[in-house]
Image (cartoon, rainbow, N blue to C red):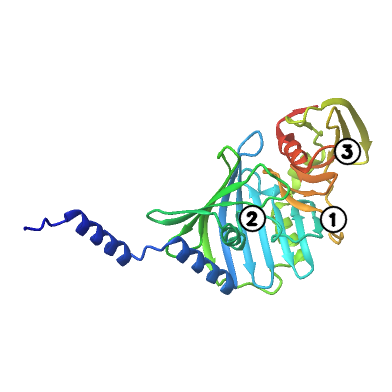
Amino acid sequence: MRKVFNWKLLIFGLLILVLAACGEKSQEDVVKKLSENLEKLSSYKAQAEMTMNTGQEEQKFNIDIWHKKDGYYRVSLSSNLDDKGSQIILKNKDGVFVLTPALNKSFKFQSEWPQNSSQPYLYQSLINDVLKDGEAAFEANDSHYVFRTKTNYQSNNNLPNQEIYFDKKTLTPATVKVLDKDNNVLVEVNFASFELDSKFAEDDFSVDKNLAASAASAAPSGEEAVSESKQVLSVMLPEYTAGAELAEQKNVELENGNRVILTFTGERSFTLVEEHAEVLPTLSEPKEVKGEIVNLGHTVAALTDKTLEWSYDGVDYILASDELTKDEMIQVAESVQGKSTK
């Protein structure tokens, strides 16, 4: 009896050979290689743009990321619209710091950052999120390996998942999309460059050097400085109030401006204090904080159990509440950029 040649089987076999020849890796292969990269990682420099849709308006930031072994990090975040509002998250042998160079201000955190939370712009954090999620989804396209993993944002439960795009050739990050519960992209990080085995000066991760170098480029001068000193405080009201309503607005005259105390009452009562940010003396000691570093979108904040403190556009803010949850405090703070009143 004459045998019928199975062309489909032949084509399938040839396809398998082509894929093997192209070096297509399985999920297990990629995970293993990422783990190896993590173990031998000594240093890197990266540049990225982060887009955040967590507030009322889309915010874009330029990010410079530096890392060297033994736990040294420097993450510089600056708005695409205003470099003077730049902030630096710094970790060295002395601790974790958030610097606002234009104000010569620094916070020192008693924190395990960055290990205590997902960080969409840090290579180590992204790899660890992949390694820890035994149920991570995986796919490969023409240029990237894509993982969909759970996130670990201890102070924000509204961002449960992320998609991480690793470059196929280098396995360095290309794009990260952080998703809400409805799979909307609220945070997106696009890497413009990523350089492994970078070289650093001995003091590149020191507080003093980073404050001095960044403050010099951000400080106003001449007519601009005079104009800023005469600026009237515009009181910013939150769009999101967790059901509370503004009950009282109190103005306090200060030597160099004024302070506004806003009291909101309801099921979740809170107080929001706003005042002109003061440029601190050069030798000021960092303010110690027993709390967490939180990215609000438009700025970086210090979060404790009952307070959230941040600076933005020349104004210091303190949000205090015994009743708001941490998630709610973050939502209120993110929405303070929403509208203003004199």
Residue 7 drawn above or below residue 181: below
- For badge 3, the amino acid type reads Gly
Quadrant location of the N terminus?
Answer: bottom left
* Spatial separation of the CA atoms under disc 1 and disc 3: 29 Å
Q: Nearer the viewer, mark 1 or mark 3?
A: 1
- Residue underneath mark 3: 257
- For badge 2, the amino acid type reads Gln
Q: Residue at x 85, y 53 (%)?
A: 280
Q: Secondary structure at mark 3?
A: strand
Q: Residue at x 20, y 59 (%)?
A: 10
* Spatial separation of the CA atoms under disc 3 and disc 2: 37 Å
Q: Residues within 10 Å of mark 1 (few under 14, many from 20)?
A: few
Identify the image quadrant of residue 92.
bottom right
Q: Earlier in the sequence, mark 1 or mark 3?
A: 3
Quadrant location of the C terminus?
Answer: top right
Q: Residue at x 42, y 62 (%)?
A: 26
Residue 19 placement (x, y as % from top left): 31, 62
Disc 1 + disc 3, Cβ < 8 Å: no
Identify the image quadrant of residue 128.
bottom right
- Residue underneath mark 1: 290
Q: Residue at x 76, y 56 (%)?
A: 99
Q: Residues within 10 Å of mark 3 (few under 14, many from 20)?
A: some
Residue 119: image tag: 2
Residue 143 placement (x, y as % from top left): 40, 56
Q: Residues within 10 Å of mark 2 (few under 14, many from 20)?
A: some
Identify the image quadrant of residue 55.
top right
* Spatial separation of the CA atoms under disc 1 and disc 2: 20 Å
